[in-house]
Image (spheres, rainbow, N blue to C red):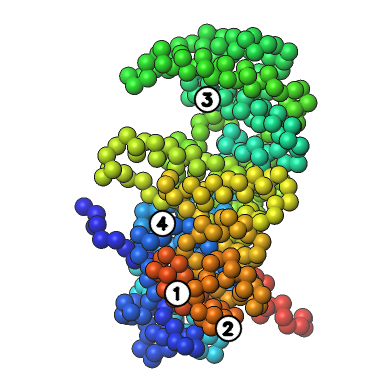
Amino acid sequence: MSSSVQSSLVLGWEMTKGFDPTYWIGTKAAPGKHAPQDVVSVSAADIARHFIVVAQSGSGKSFFLGRLIEEILIKSKSRVVIVDPNSDFRRIALPVSGKLWETAKYDVAHRRGFLPDEASVSAFKKNWDKVSKVVWSARIDRSGKDDALKIQRLEIDWTGISTEVLSGELDPVLESEIRRCHDFVRTISRLIAFTKAKDWSSKHDLLEVTQQLCESTRGMTQPQVAEKLRHDFTISAGPLTESEDTPKQVITAAVDLLCRQASIHRAFVSEPMEKFYFSNAFDIRASRLLRRSNVSLVSEKVPRLQVVDIPSITESRFRPWIVSTILSTEWQRALRNWEITLDNPPDEDSRVPTFIVIDEAHNLVPAEPRNYSEKGLREQIRRIAAEGRKFGLFLILVSQRPDKLDPLVVSECENRVVMKLGSQAVLSRTQELLGLTHIPERLLERTLEFDVGRALLAGAWVNDNPVLMYSAARRTEEGGRNLRASYWAVGDHE
C-alpha cells in the first residue's frame, strides 16, 4: 500500500547574506549529510498552480527548471509535457555522471558548484528510472528510435491542429471557410472511428480519404452529401461496431448526425479553399510529421514525461502547428478524464496534474501577436491559464522577457520564480507584471546582484513569504550547450 504522506520537493539550499549556500561552505559538507533546515523545500500539494520563471540568459534558469521538473516527477504522480525550443531537455533521460557526487563541492572563488542533496547518483536513479519518458523528435527516422535517450519519432494527429493557427494570415471570411474545411475532416475522422475497423484506419490515410470525398461531393446539395456519406460509411462499410454499452440504434443515430454535420461543413467550402487546406496538410505530411493512423492521440496511454524537441522541426512554419496540436491533445485528454471522473465518487478520483512547460514563453504567449498563428496559440494558452485548474492542467512559463508576455496569462501564475535580472528597468517591469509589489524593495533589488543559480521564490507555494535560495543540482543531462571558451578563446598555434 502506498504512503498517504505528502512529499516535499527539494528545490535548493538556504543561503547566507552573501548568497553562498550555507551548508556547502562548511568544512564537512557532503551529499546527503545535510539537515532538513539546510534545504529549501515546498509541499507537493502546493505545486498544483500555474508557474512563471523570469530570468535573464545565463542565470541558470535551465538548470533550475530541470531541477523543478525532476522533483515534480519523482516526488509526485504528476505528468510533465515540455515544449523545448532549445533542445535543453533532449537528453533528460540520462542522469549526469556519478563522479559529480564524488567531487561535489562549492567553489567559493567562482561562486558555483554541483550541489546534490542525495548521497549518490544511484539514489536518484532508482526513482528517476521509474518515470516513463519520451522525447519526440523529427530528427529520428520513422522506423527508428534511440532507446538510451528515449527518443521517438515526432508525429501529430492532424485533426488536433487549431484552425486559428492553421489559418495564418487569412482574412476573417476565409478563416471561417478553413474552419469549415477542418471541421469536415474532423467529422469524417469521427465517422471512420464509428464505422471502420481499426486495421482499416491504420492502412488508409485520413487526408487522402477526405480529399477524395471533397472531390466526389463537389457541387452536391447538403442532402446529397449526407446521403453519400451514409452510403459510404454504413452500407458499403459493413455492420457497425456495437457493444453492450452502445447498442446499434445509438450508433446508427450518431452516424446519421455526423453525416448531416459533415454535409453542412462541406457546403461552405469552395474548391480554392480545398486546394489551400489540403496543400498545407500534405506539406506537413511530406515532412513526416503526421501520423497515418486515424486513432486519436487523446485515447492513447502516454508517458509521464514528454519532451517536444522543437528545433528538430526544420520547417519553422510547422512549429506553431505542432505546439497547437500538443496543447489541443492535452486539453481534450484532461476534459475526457474530467468527464469520466464526474460519474464516479469523489474518493475514487485518480486524476493527476499535468504541467505544460513552455520555455522562451514570450515567443508563444506574446503580449502583441504578430499574426493569426501567434494569436491562435495565445488563445489556447489563455484558455489553459483561465480554465485549466479544474481539469488538472497547469502552465510553467519561462522567459527572460516578462515585458513581452501576455499580461492575462501572467496574472494567473500564482507560483513565481525570479532569478538574475539585468537592469532596474527589467526588475520594475517584472515587479509590476508578477504582482510582487508586496515584497520589500530591497529584497527584490537583490535579484540584480544574483550570480548564476540564485533564485527568489514567491507566491502561493511559499505561503506568500519570499524565499531566497541557491538551486540544488539538476541531476539529468542538459541537451543545449554554449560554446566552449577553453577551446575557442585561445590562439591556434598549430
Disc 4 designates what residue? 48
Report the Cα–Cα distance between label 1 and label 4: 18 Å
Disc 2 designates what residue? 449
Dot placed on the residue nearer the N-terminal end, 4 or 2: 4
Q: Work out whether 258 lies above or below 458.
A: above
Q: Residues within 10 Å of mark 3 (few under 14, many from 20)?
A: some
Q: From this viewpoint, is residue 131 visible? A: yes
Evaluate if marks 3 and 4 touch, with contact meaning CB atoms under 8 Å apart: no
Q: Amino acid at mark 3?
A: Arg
Give the number of the mark in front: 1 or 2: 1
Q: Amino acid at mark 2?
A: Glu
Dot placed on the residue nearer the N-terminal end, 1 or 4: 4
Give the number of the mark in front: 3 or 1: 1
Give the number of the mark in front: 2 or 3: 2
- Give the x, y percent position of residue 90: 56, 58
Q: From this viewpoint, is residue 114 visible? A: no
Which residue is at 78% across, 26% downward?
272
